[in-house]
Image: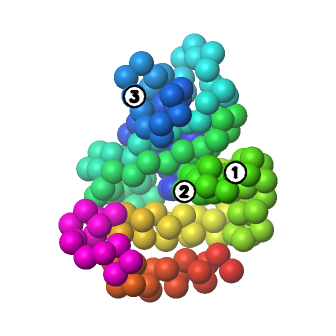
Amino acid sequence: GRVVDGPLYKAKVCIDKNLNGKCDEGEPITYTDEQGYFTFQNSADLGKYPIVAEVIANQTVDTRFNSTFSVNLTLVTPAGKSVVSPFTSMVYSYANTTGEDFENAATTLQEKLGFNPLTDYIEEGNKEAEKSAIVTTKMVEKLKKQVMNDDKPFWDILYRNREYLDEMKQIAQ
């Protein structure tokens, strides 16, 4: 499989057997290489459960920019998929929120984004998707950092960062 925002190096990846959205002791765990690829040795559970990638602050490297992340982030992909990205995380979240199956959720998001959210957009050379991923991840990273360090209500933080939200809307159209 592969973890992409850009290729993510040193992300912790697991098969989420207990479906709690994080990597726990006892679950198959590995780390990504410099190009974001990962493999699990001898895991009969691969394909049966979601794959979680934990982006670790000050450790995981976005190799496009040769920089680490300032906060921990979690990315996930539905069972049976091998690419983990901000967009697979959106599909997973959308399906769990709406009750749709993952394929219908992916189709709904593809109509909104203009590309298949379950593919490796870097390998495909999809610059539009790559740009959207950069903006999405930077927005989430900035908002998460502000929420952690700010006693203001979350909606106030969103309002103060509306230029990022406006940029996301423009990219998604």
Query: Which numbered disc flags the more N-terminal residue, 2 or 1?
Result: 2
At label 3, the amino acid type is Asp
**Residue placed at 78% from the left, 53% from the top?**
104
Tell me the quarter of the picture where residue 82 sits: top right
Residue 110 highlighted magenta (yes or no): no
Query: Which numbered disc flags the more N-terminal residue, 3 or 1?
Result: 3
Location of the C terminus by quadrant is bottom right
Question: Does any portion of residue 18 appear in the rendered image?
Answer: yes
Query: Which numbered disc flags the more N-terminal residue, 2 or 3?
Result: 3
Q: Can you identify the residue that label 2 sits on?
A: 86
Q: 31 or 14, which lies in front?
A: 14
Q: Can you identify the residue that label 3 sits on?
A: 24
Q: What is the distance, in whole Å, between disc 2 and disc 1 at their CAs?
A: 20 Å
Residue 145 highlighted magenta (yes or no): yes
Q: Can you identify the residue that label 1 sits on?
A: 99
- Residue segment shown in magenta: 144-156
Magenta stretch: dominant secondary structure: helix
**Residue placed at 44% from the left, 26% from the top?**
29
Question: Does any portion of residue 68 appear in the rendered image?
Answer: no
